Image (spheres, grey):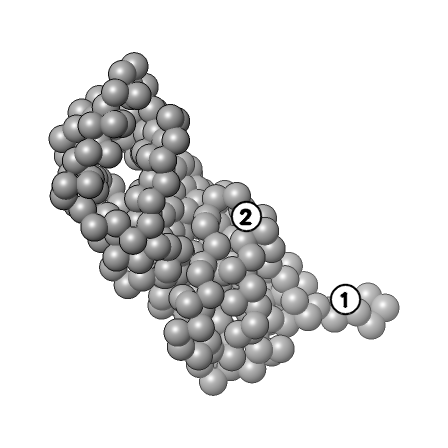
Amino acid sequence: MRRWTSVYHFDWTPIITFGVRRLNLLEWMEKNLDPVAFSDTEHHLGVALLDKNIRIVVHRSGMVLQDAAASASGVSSLNPAIEGVFEILEPKSVVLRAAATAWSSELAGIDYNDARAWFARHTSGIDSWPYGFRAIDASALMDLEAHDYSAQVEWGVVSAPELAERLTHTQEGRMSSNRPPASGLAIGAEPLPATSLFVDMSMRSEHSDVISDTKGIEAAIQFVDTVGSSIASSLIETAVKETGN
């Protein structure tokens, strides 16, 4: 199973003196970081480290970390910048507000058309349709709820071109605004499987724990990835078991 693109939204108490602190953060970054890409306005500050598609965007009320490179290490390369955010901006009441991740796993040895037809029958619960119709394809959207989090998951069987399309053109999905599109280099780095199960997941929290440092940010991201991986694995294991029979 592979995690593809991801994004994590953190909120904090709006910083009244953001304009001044933003300039101080700019100075700190110039002295301590080697950005590969950079953006700056009076309302935000954005920087990419190591890869221009892995970036942090900071604004008055929070920050966004995103990986559009589908990196194995995710957004961890941004940790030096996050250290500066806590040191210079001194944000208060930092919480993880929302996140989105995309996952896929190869359905090895399973024909694409057979797999998507199975998925259509499995999700509808109907094997025989009237007037000669037969189910050939489907996708599913599910709402999930835990004590402090809610989530939406969309999943379905995809071919190699469809997987590339879903990753690079996120508007193809029903949660298109939640996740950054993958860069072309991320998709073209290796051959995509002929048949995969694709899982698109978004999470949101209204009551997450307050974070006070970079380690807390790392822990929140790890939590999101663990939840996403577990949910995706459950869906993929079911698909492999059922389609393999």
Query: Which amino acid type is marked by label 2?
Result: Ser
Which label number is shown at residue 15?
none
Name the spot of residue 10 as percent of width and height, x first: 32, 34
Residue 51 lies in quadrant: bottom left
User: Compared with residue 85, is residue 54 higher up or lower down, i.e. above or below?
Assistant: below
Question: Residue 128 versus residue 196: which sits nearer the camera?
Answer: 196
In which quarter of the view is residue 166 placed? bottom right
Q: Nearer the viewer, residue 152 or 171?
A: 171
Left or right, 174 with respect to 47, comes to: right
Locate residue 159: give its quadrant: bottom right
Q: Nearer the viewer, mark 1 or mark 2?
A: 2
Left or right: 40 as drawn, with respect to 26: right
Where residue 67 appears, as percent x and y from the top left, is: 35, 53
Q: Could you tell whether 26 is left or right of 121 in the image?
A: left
Amino acid residing under circle 1: Trp
Circle number at residue 176? 2
Q: Residue at x 27, y 16 (%)?
A: 17
